Amino acid sequence: MADCLFCKIIAGEIPSTKVYEDEYCYAFKDIAPQMPVHIIVVPKKHLANVLECTEEDIEIAGRIQLAIANIAREQGFAENGFRVINNCGRDAMQTVHHIHYHILAGGMMGEKIV
């Protein structure tokens, strides 16, 4: 998608600090981290949010989960724990309309949301 921030990052049109990349997804450091570790994981296929996922996207969803696990191990925060967040739609405050997951780690977090 031509005007999508994350599509431009994936294409290398906007610089990012890459943490992980495979055939299905791209992960980079957030430019305004909310924790000592704040990584964004996005599928390379443009999907606005989880509501756009179809049966044909099942492999992408699974690959993103594997990428998150690999990133946690490679970056050294798997043992102490981390949080994965996906915001979907207006009420969830989704600001970039390309499905993405925030990985937060590197310190004790506040109360869990659920």
Image (cartoon, grey):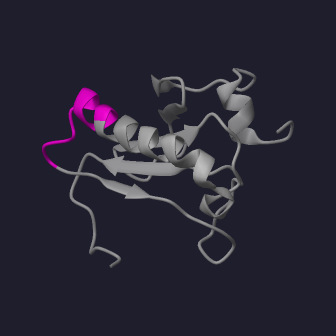
Q: Residue furthest right?
A: 2
Residue 103 image point, x, y percent: 39, 48
Which residue is pictured at 68% across the width and 58% down the height? 52
The front one of 108 and 54 is 54
- On the picture, is 32 further left or further right than 91? left
**Is 49 located above or below residue 70 in the figure?**
below
Give the total number of marks visible in the rendering: 0
**Is 45 located above or below residue 103 in the figure?**
above
Residue 80 image point, x, y percent: 14, 48
**Is 92 located above or below residue 76 in the figure?**
below
**Is 57 located above or below residue 108 in the figure?**
above
For the C terminus, which image quadrant? bottom left
- On the picture, is 44 further left or further right than 112? right
Q: Residue furthest left?
A: 79
Which residue is pictured at 63% across the width and 55% down the height? 54
Which residue is pictured at 82% across the width and 39% down the height? 1
The front one of 63 and 113 is 63
Residue 88 image point, x, y percent: 60, 66
Residue 32 image point, x, y percent: 53, 46
Q: Is residue 112 magenta?
A: no
Which residue is pictured at 21% across the width and 58% down the height? 108
Q: Is residue 73 magenta?
A: yes
Which region shows up in magenta? 70-80
- On the picture, is 82 further left or further right than 65? left
Q: Residue furthest front?
A: 55
Say which quarter of the image contains residue 65.
top left
